[in-house]
Image (cartoon, rainbow, N blue to C red):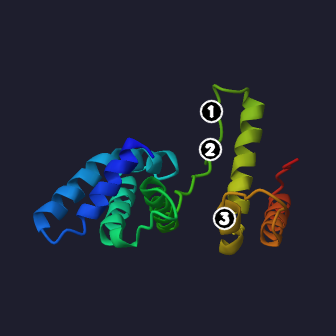
Amino acid sequence: MTERDMVTSQLLSRLADPDEGIQQEARDALYLIWAPPLYRAAKSRGLSDEHSATSCVGDTLMCVYLKHDQFDAKKGTTEQWIWGIFRNQMSTSLRKTPPPEEELAQAGPSASQVGPEEYLERAERCVGINRAWERLDDAHRQELGKKRKPGPVSRARKAALEQFRQLLKEEGVNYE
């Protein structure tokens, strides 16, 4: 059992104290102990903006404060319990905060980066890709925007890829 775990365990028991002052001191101490590592974890695991990361930490600690009586030492340490709550809050936060859609290049590379012929070819290819993407239906666009999970490719993803390939072909874009 780590020192942080022992201190956290004592603070959780103080949350049950009938004295509001003792409860507030326990909440403040839990915040000081847990907010920094939870914030770093939120930022490193996908909540890149400060508001979302701070909100996730606040939601996690609020859950700890409200459900302190549900902690069971037989099932694990206080650290494991709090990190479990954090993982659940992260999942919720990531679902609430869709990843920003990356904008597709509108003009392609600049003429100074490549020769004039290659510049025109790349620019035309970018335009064709953008047109194909815009013609792709919303469901397939969302499917292709998701992070691919390990394992076999799903039927929905295969269908989305097939439609996008067909649209690229119609736009005259050679993707191979």
Q: Secondary structure at mark 1?
A: loop
Q: Residue at x 66, y 61 (%)?
A: 146
Q: Residue at x 84, y 55 (%)?
A: 172
Q: Residue furthest front?
A: 74
**Alpha carbon of mark 2 to alpha carbon of mark 3: how far?**
16 Å
Q: Position of residue 95 (x, y in %)?
A: 52, 67
Q: Position of residue 9 (x, y in %)?
A: 35, 56
In the image, which disc is placed on residue 134?
3
In the image, which disc is placed on residue 107?
2
- Asked if residue 34 can be seen in this view, the reply is no
Q: Nearer the viewer, mark 2 or mark 3?
A: 3
Amino acid marked by disc 3: Glu
Residue 90 sits above or below residue 107 on the image: below
Q: Position of residue 104 (x, y in %)?
A: 62, 51
Q: Secondary structure at mark 3?
A: helix
Q: Residue at x 32, y 49 (%)?
A: 7
Crowding near pointer 3: few (<14 within 10 Å), some, many (20+)?
Answer: few
Relative to 24, is 127 on the left or the right?
A: right
**Alpha carbon of mark 1 to alpha carbon of mark 3: how far?**
23 Å
Q: Nearer the viewer, mark 1 or mark 3?
A: 3
Q: Which residue is mark 1?
A: 110
Q: Quadrant of residue 24?
A: bottom left
In terms of depth relative to the viewer, which is nearer, 100 or 21? 21
Q: Quadrant of residue 140?
A: bottom right
